[in-house]
Image (spheres, rainbow, N blue to C red):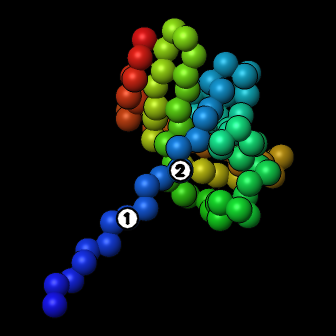
Amino acid sequence: MTERSEVPPRPLRIYADFNSGGTNDTACWCLRYNGALLDDLERELNLREGQAVVLYYEDPAEEFEVDATLEIHTAFAKWQAMPDWSTMRRLRG
């Protein structure tokens, strides 16, 4: 009998609007998954603090993705992501 190695689940790929005014160099809070606000999908997606995700941005001029970690914004009790800009990958532009 051969053992199957388990493949770790892929991180959620979440759209981040980096032009929304709700972002800065350290946090992004305008987040969507399949068109819905991430805050509205918390239970369905089993979100948890410290969860690894991939943020992506796309428009006609550029497209990129970056690894990030989810957190709860303490003042607003909403999900935000902390991007690791050293992992940024340009997909177009």
Which mark identifies residue 12?
Answer: 2
Name the residue at 73% across, 58% down: 42
Name the residue at 58% across, 41% down: 14
Name the residue at 75% across, 42% down: 37
Give the class, few, some or many, for how many residues have Cα within 10 Å of label 1's Cα (few <14, many ≥20). few
Which mark identifies residue 8?
Answer: 1
**SS at circle 2:** strand
* Front-most of residues 41 and 82: 41
Q: Position of residue 75 (x, y in %)?
A: 82, 47
Q: Is residue 9 above or below residue 26?
A: below
- Disc tally is 2
Q: Is residue 56 above or below residue 50?
A: above
Kind of residue at disc 1:
Pro
Give the class, few, some or many, for how many residues have Cα within 10 Å of label 2's Cα (few <14, many ≥20). some
For residue 73, say whether it is visible.
no
* Front-most of residues 61 and 30: 61
Name the residue at 74% across, 21% down: 21
Quadrant of residue 86 within the rendered picture:
top left
Q: Position of residue 60 (x, y in %)?
A: 55, 11
Q: Position of residue 23 (x, y in %)?
A: 67, 28
Q: Quadrant of the N terminus?
A: bottom left
